[in-house]
Image (cartoon, rainbow, N blue to C red):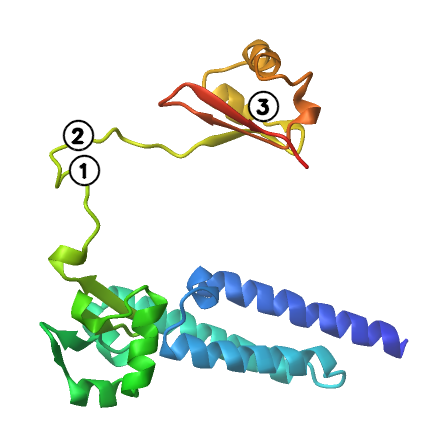
């Protein structure tokens, strides 16, 4: 009986954490800001406590609800009142601009020079002379604007009109035909069968992944190894 109670309590913890995370949104599991980081750690700790609390499960459950509600309310507040974001999330800080490093801003960001250069190297900038502006974002990442001479050339720079690109659509996955995707692309089973034979496949079962690109009217097939 005790084992069943433990299992049911653990399941309650999992369900509660899942519901709260869904309410708080995907940002909680992506790039965290300051409050999301704190609430994420705390909610995880409370959830762990809930999974082993067999007597008074309502206490950690209430705490979960309070933290989840507080995070949801602050996110809602920052969307409704944009001026509150600088107090809740913080503001971007310029660390380098036009060859000038801002010592006070580095201190404000709690970064020393070695940490700053490490963040630059992670984005492929080993020489600070290549950097026009570096901004420390509120999520702890550094955004870098390279100098004009160091930016990759674009078709516009070379007066070339580039064709629009579109995301390929999976029509076969792990040997299974994705019927809805096929119809959405205006194709049918007969067309797919002809394409398979044209590329040397007997049937869809031999295909690990098939991607159709409408702008090229092209089906790319990958054989699983």
**Disc nearer the start of the sequence (3/1):** 1
x and y percentages locating residue 100 in the rendered image: 11, 79
85 above or below 213? below
What distance separates the C-alpha of mark 3 from that of mark 2?
Answer: 35 Å
Q: Secondary structure at mark 2?
A: loop
Q: Residues within 10 Å of mark 2 (few under 14, many from 20)?
A: few
58 above or below 14? below
Q: Secondary structure at mark 1?
A: loop
Rendered-image quadrant of the C terminus: top right
**For the point 73% across and 82% down, which residue is it?**
52
Report the mark closest to the observer, 3 or 1: 1
What distance separates the C-alpha of mark 3 from that of mark 1?
Answer: 37 Å
x and y percentages locating residue 9 in the rendered image: 74, 74
Q: Which mark is residue 161?
A: 2
**Disc nearer the start of the sequence (2/1):** 1
Query: Residue under circle 1?
Result: 155
Confirm or deny contact between disc 3 and disc 1 (CB under 8 A).
no
């Amino acid at each position: 009986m005790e084992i069943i109670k433990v299992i049911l309590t653990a399941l309650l913890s999992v369900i509660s954490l899942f519901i709260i995370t869904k309410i708080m949104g995907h940002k909680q599991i992506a790039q965290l800001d300051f409050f999301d980081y704190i609430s994420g750690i705390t909610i995880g700790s409370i959830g762990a406590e809930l999974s082993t609390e067999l007597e008074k499960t309502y206490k950690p459950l209430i705490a979960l609800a309070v933290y989840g509600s507080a995070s949801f309310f602050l996110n809602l507040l920052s969307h409704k009142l944009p001026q509150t974001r600088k107090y809740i999330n913080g503001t971007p800080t310029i660390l380098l601009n036009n060859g000038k490093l801002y010592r006070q801003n580095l201190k404000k960001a709690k970064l020393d020079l070695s940490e700053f250069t490490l963040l630059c190297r992670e984005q492929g900038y080993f020489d600070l002379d290549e950097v026009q502006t570096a901004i420390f974002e509120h999520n702890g990442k550094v955004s870098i604007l390279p100098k004009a001479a160091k930016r990759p050339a674009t078709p516009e720079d070379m007066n070339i009109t580039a064709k629009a690109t579109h995301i390929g659509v999976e029509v076969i996955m792990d040997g299974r035909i994705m019927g809805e995707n096929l119809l959405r692309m205006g194709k049918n089973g007969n067309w797919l069968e002809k394409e398979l034979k044209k590329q040397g496949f007997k049937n869809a079962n031999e295909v690990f992944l098939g991607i159709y690109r409408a702008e090229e009217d092209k089906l790319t097939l990958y054989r699983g190894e």
